[in-house]
Structures are given as structure tokens and as C-alpha cells.
């Protein structure tokens, strides 16, 4: 059986996920800051293009939830 080795992007994603989960569990920083930092880390590392990374912020559901939070 051939041993599987991880590629550099897989290692980077795994490291970002582990760091993000650790920061979530630690609770020192706000959850939105941790999530946005993880997204920016993926963009800076070249794992996700900036257009794809921030495309979700224009989705109507995200805008609706943001408006509800502002109104409440």
C-alpha cells in the first residue's frame, strides 16, 4: 500500500483550521474576527482567490441577516 503524503496547500489549510478552532475554543477573540482572519489567511496563502473569498458577502441571505442584526 502506498503511503499518502500531504501537499503544501493541504498542510496550510489544516494549519489554518487547527489555529482557527484553537482560537474559537480559547474564546479570547470575537468569533467574527477569528473567522475573518482565517479567511484572510487563506487569501494571503493563495488557497482561495479574493473574488471567490468575498463573493459570499454579496449574497442576499447574508445581507438580510446583517440588516436584522442592525435593526435588533
Image (cartoon, rainbow, N blue to C red):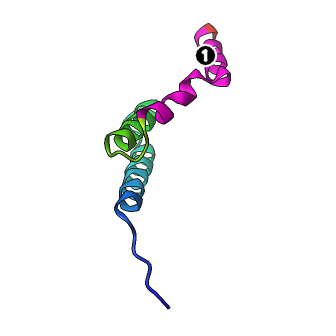
Q: Is residue 23 magenta?
A: no
Residue 23 place in picture, x, y as percent: 39, 45
Vertical relation: 7 (above or below) 38: below
Residues shaded magenta: 50-70
Vertical relation: 65 (above or below) 16: above
| Residue found 66% across the figure and 20% down from its top | 60
Can you name the residue that lies furthest to the bottom here? 1
| Residue found 42% across the figure and 33% down from its top | 50
Vertical relation: 12 (above or below) 32: below
Quarter assignment of residue 56: top right
| Residue found 48% across the figure and 29% down from its top | 54
Q: Which residue is mark 1?
A: 69
Residue 70 place in picture, x, y as percent: 58, 11
Q: Residues within 10 Å of mark 1 (few under 14, many from 20)?
A: few
Main SS, magenta region, reads helix
In the rendered structure, the answer to whether residue 46 lies left or right of residue 25 reads: left
Q: Secondary structure at mark 1?
A: helix
Of residues 53 and 33, which is closer to you in this image?
A: 53
Of residues 26 and 64, which is closer to you in this image?
A: 64
**Where, quadrant-wise, is the C terminus in this rendering?**
top right
Vertical relation: 69 (above or below) 7: above
Amino acid at each position: 500500500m502506498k503511503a499518502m503524503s500531504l501537499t503544501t496547500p493541504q498542510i496550510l489549510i489544516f494549519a489554518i483550521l487547527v489555529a482557527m478552532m484553537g482560537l474559537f475554543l480559547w474564546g479570547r477573540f470575537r468569533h467574527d474576527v477569528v473567522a475573518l482572519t482565517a479567511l484572510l489567511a487563506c487569501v494571503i496563502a493563495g488557497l482561495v482567490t479574493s473574488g471567490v473569498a468575498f463573493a459570499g458577502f454579496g449574497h442576499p441571505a447574508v445581507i438580510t441577516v446583517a440588516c436584522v442584526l442592525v435593526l435588533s
